[in-house]
Amino acid sequence: MTKGIKIATIGGGSSYTPELVEGFIKRYDEFPLSELWLVDVEEGKEKLEIVGNLAKRMIENAGLPIDVHLTLNRREALKDADFVTTQFRVGGLDARAKDERIPVEYGVLGQETNGPGGLFKGLRTIPVILGITKDMEELCPNAWLINFTNPAGMVTEAILRYSNINKVVGLCNVPIGMEMGVAKLLDVDHSRIRIDFAGLNHMVYGLDVYLDGVSVKEKVIQKLSDPENASFVKNIEGIGWEPAFIQALNALTCPYHMYYYKSKEMLDKTIESSKTEGTRAEVVQALEKDLFELYKDENLNIKPPQLEERGGAYYSDAAVRLITSIYNDKRDIQPVNTRNRGAIASIPDESAVEVSCVITKDGPVPLAVGDLPVAARGLVQQIKSFERIAAEAAVTGDYNQAVLALTINPLTPSDAIAKQIIDDMMGAHQAYLPQFFLEKVTMN
């Protein structure tokens, strides 16, 4: 890295990019970035230009010597990169809207990373991310891949199983959002809070929570029993836990647990919201339209506060904190998605888990937590089975495996309904699922 640090961001036209740029600006003293390459596809060219120009203005305003490059040529950006960050959405928000609307027609929750929506986002995404890892093997074999693309757990699982890239870390803003939420609940600075995380992406539990190194889990759980404190993440509207449930569980839940522990309520809320304000994807489309109008303003040279409504709050804190810790061998503790390596006893060693890790120059070292609580273990194992079979279906294009994956997902009521949803969504997303249709095209 003596020639300066180069980062390639795949999905550079994302509305999240100003978050990332802000993070690099704030941490420049300890992470002297010299080249930031923002990459997108042809369909995202206009957004890439808008976001890229804002990024340049932000860096100029900060007075930092960081060169920003915009390109539609992924290989050009990857060449000799030190870090690669991924934050893309195959099919865009239109595909997400289908993921959310189609399952509801069958009485099944439609959501970005859970159930049928999570499955199909994975089926569309995994072949693309594996193409990126193949390019990395050739063009930047020593680079770290920091994946923020959802479903982050399934995507990390696929990379670990089906690529030759070992320097990969999956990242999510939910754990840091939980930390921030606890800090707010206790009215203290975030730096004083630490949570022992263990589980899977969007299925992670806080096994203990510390204030200045002293456990305050019981106090936090008591506060979480209040419906007003149900959710810490902008894009999930909490309903509130039954006090008996959350106190007996004796662990901090993440907001996405609502979809599994309150399936009926969340399905009802999703149906009602889709009729009134639209699906979450449609709400985000409106938010993004306004954001990109803001981004166009040539006088704007900071990250606009409205971006937090997008659902990516603390992304820059999580992403750049991780990258900086790897670069500086900080050996601090952060929750990330990485290979289990025995950290969680009831999950295979080679599988991807989301767990608190010591972050070193050689990557994350998971902190051993032993087994998960009995109350959480079965659900986590079921979702891990879903992720593994879904990843296999994405790689092989095996229709039967896709049906199996959706059937064993706890949000799906039966194999017959799983097959109906698969058939409907396969048709809706055919353009982004070539691995399932190539044989049929060839035969025709």
Image (tube, rainbow, N blue to C red):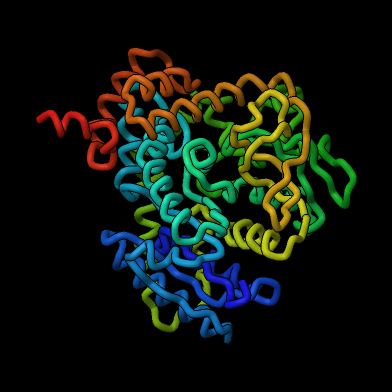
Q: Position of residue 91 (x, y in %)?
A: 31, 47
Q: Locate residue 37 relative to residue 244 in the image: left or right.
A: left
Image quadrant assignment for residue 369 = top right
Image quadrant assignment for residue 271 = top left
Q: Residue at x 61, y 43 (%)?
A: 337
Q: Position of residue 130 (x, y in %)?
A: 42, 45
Q: Nearer the viewer, residue 294 or 374?
A: 374
User: What is the number of callouts on the image?
Assistant: 0
Name above or below for residue 231 compared with residue 391: below
Name above or below for residue 345 compared with residue 172: above
Q: Position of residue 402 (x, y in %)?
A: 37, 25
Q: Is any part of residue 28 visible from this angle?
A: yes
Q: Residue at x 81, y 37 (%)?
A: 217
Name above or below for residue 127 compared with residue 296: above
Q: Nearer the viewer, residue 314 or 381?
A: 381
Q: Locate residue 297 relative to residue 225 in the image: left or right.
A: left
Q: Locate residue 258 relative to residue 287 in the image: left or right.
A: right
- The quarter in which the C terminus is drawn is top left
Question: Looking at the image, which residue sits at the far front?
Answer: 138
Q: Residue at x 39, y 24 (%)?
A: 108
- The quarter in which the N terminus is drawn is bottom right
Q: Is any part of residue 271 visible from this angle?
A: no
Q: Position of residue 47 (x, y in %)?
A: 34, 66
Q: Residue at x 54, y 26 (%)?
A: 383
Question: Looking at the image, which residue sits at the far left?
Answer: 444
